[in-house]
Every structure is written in structure tokens, then in C-alpha cells.
Image (cartoon, helix red, strand yellow):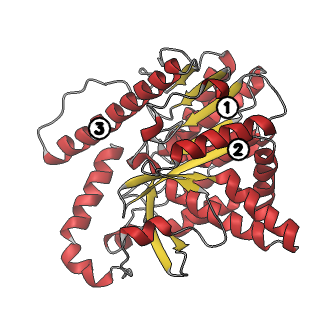
Amino acid sequence: MVLKAMIRAFLILCACLSLTGCLSMPRELFDDTAQKQAQPVGFTAIRMTSDDNQLTERLEQDLRTQRQARKTSGPLSILALSGGGADGAFGAGVLNGWTQRGDRPEFDVVTGVSTGALIAPFAYLGSAYDDRLRDAYTSGIATKAMSKRGLGALFTPGMFSSRRFAALVEHFVDVPLIEAIAAKTEQGGRLYVATTNLDTQSGVIWDIGAIATQGTDRDRRDGGDAGRTEACALIREILAASASVPGAFAPVMITTQTADGRRIEEMHVDGSVTMPFFVLPESMLSWTVPQDLRSNARIYVLINGNVSPHFAVTRNRSLDVAARSLDTLTRAQARTTLISIRGFAARNGVGVLTASIPDDFSGGGLLAFDKDSMQRVFALGHARGLAGDAFRSDGR
């Protein structure tokens, strides 16, 4: 079982702490004040957290800006993509099948967490990127990148090679992709990805469109391509961090800088540690959108996994109990988040549709990166997207 493997790896690491303490990477200490001031070098106002006291004002201003930039007055389509590791093949399949069906909307806002963060840029840019999305989850390239590290995993964090994973992200995220993201963002689109900052123990929502736009704007002003290159590098780091499942991959260190020029190395991991999927920061789900900013909108929540409770007799062993508890926590967190999103939507006159892997499907899994398994999960999603029954209002 995938969860058992993760728990086993974690327990082995704990047992080896006395041997590995001298091998840990040192970090310069900093305080919460410095953390709150810090921003990635060369970029401003590109991320938000729930404790931002200007969050409501920022979001309302952005809604007005987005409305002015959109080229259509039609319904606003929002896509929220969940985590799920290798089961991201399901979401990739749904989007491909939906395109083939012919009624897939062009999403105005796309959000992603973990494997959903890797899907998000392609979903944001539309069906023209379906082939690249399919290849990422079915060609076997992910299988090669996710080979286990053997004994090396005992001495540094992560069962899988972060170097190979970073190379996989770099393969699919390039400067032309950044330019395309910037172009859509300038037309009113929004692309957000979440990571978890382990130092602050909070989720961080990154405005990927703003990063891409600021990079391209800098190049227009100064000439050259340094801005786009730096934007591409930062976005790669963020996407890799969002998908870095603790225990499976090492954390991603993101360099930021305070107003006085001090450099800080922030430790970021999988966004689903703090949010399984999102439409807004959690503190904003009780927000009532001002009447003048409301618009006919629909939220599509695409869950790369299954959130329903699943009966199974748990063996009375520490590993089985820990794995079952983690699985239960993950599913419960997803259901709670979905309830909160539905409450926000109902209060603001927004429709919500949910897609997830059916209860009766056997196979796949968070770390099931073998090619055959991922192709099977993709085929399931593709069939559901093509048939038009992937999304349902009750989430089943």
C-alpha cells in the first residue's frame, strides 16, 4: 500500500536521526517579521496567505481589474485541481476527454495543489496544451523520473530524487509557456498554485500569472530575456514545491529577500499539507462578495483521487493504523474543504460541480507512478470526460 510505504520510510528516517544529524543542511535563522517582509527577488505582490490583513481589499481590487480585462461578459469558469500524486493522470484524462467531447469551457481562473499544480498551467492555457498534458502522465517520463533513491533516502529527505523531479518540471515548463501564461493573464485570466511553508506552518497561494507578467513586462521595459528567464525559474520552483509530498521528496528551498536586502531560504513542501484544493485562501471562504462584483460563475472541483469513506478492516499493527489514520485524515480534510467551498458558492450565487475517481475503481494511488497504472487512471478520466458525466453537483 502506498501510504504504508510512506509511513515505513518516515519511521526508518526517524530511527536514523542519530546517524544523520551531522549530514543535515544548515539553515540561517530568521524571525517571523523578516518572513512577512520577504519576497522573491525581482517580484512584488505575487503571493498571499490567510493572515494577510489586506487580503479582502486585494481580492476585491483584483476582481475589478479582472472584470475590466476580460474580453467576454459570459459566465466566469473556475477550475480547482486537487493533489493526488500519480492519480493526477485522472485529471489529465478528464480534461483531454472533455476537449474531445467539445463542450469544455475556457477557464478564467485555475487553481492547483500538488499534482494539480503541475496540471494547472496546461488547463489554464486551454485544449491546445492537451497533448503535453497527456504525455506528462502517460508517456512513461514520470515513471523514469520517480525511481526510488535506495539507501541514499536514509541520509537526506525523500524516497525519490528531487533532482530528477525538478528536471521533469523543467522539461514541461519553459519560457514559451511562461509567455503564454502572461498573455492570458493580461486578458483577465488568473492562475494560482499553493505550497506549504513549513516555517510558518501555513499555506501560501502564489499568483503564477503575476510572476509571468512581471517577468515579461521587465523584458519589454529593459530589453533582453532576463525577466522571463527568472520568472520561469521561480515558477518551476513553486510547481516542484507544491508537488513535493513530504517523505517522498525533499522540501524545495525558495530564496526570498527582505526590504533591507537580507536573503532568506524558505522551506516549502506539498500544498496539500494545508489545503487539498482551493478557490480562495481558507480565511476568505466566509467572505461575501460585494454585490457589484458578483457575476454568473461556476466552480469545477477536479479531485485526483477519491474522498468518500471506504470500509476496510484495519489490522492492529502500528504501520497499518498509522497509514489508515493518514488516509482517513486526508479524505476528511478534502470533504470539509468541499463543504466550505459549497457554502461560499451558495452564499454568493455560484454553482459547484465536482469530479473524482469513482468509489468502485480499483488501482492507481498517490505514488503509483508505473506507466501501466497511470495509463489506466488516465483512460478512466478520459472516458468520464468524453461521456460528459465526470462532474456532478453531488460530487459522486
Residue 368, compared with residue 376, is above or below; it is below
Judge by depth and name the residue closer to the eye, 183 or 310: 183
Which of the 4 image quadrants contains residue 155?
bottom left
Marks 2 and 1, the one that precedes in the sequence: 1
Judge by depth and name the residue closer to the eye, 331 or 371: 331
| Circles 2 and 1: CB atoms closer than 8 Å | yes
Q: Position of residue 298 (x, y in %)?
A: 63, 22
Q: Amino acid at mark 2?
A: Phe
- Indicate which disc residue 122 carries: 2
Residue positioned 53% across, 73% down in the render: 255
Q: CA distance from mark 3 to mark 2?
A: 30 Å
Q: Position of residue 110 (x, y in %)?
A: 64, 39
Q: Is residue 164 left or right of residue 10?
A: right
Q: Is residue 276 visible?
A: no
Residue positioned 50% across, 81% down in the render: 262
Q: CA distance from mark 1 to mark 3?
A: 28 Å
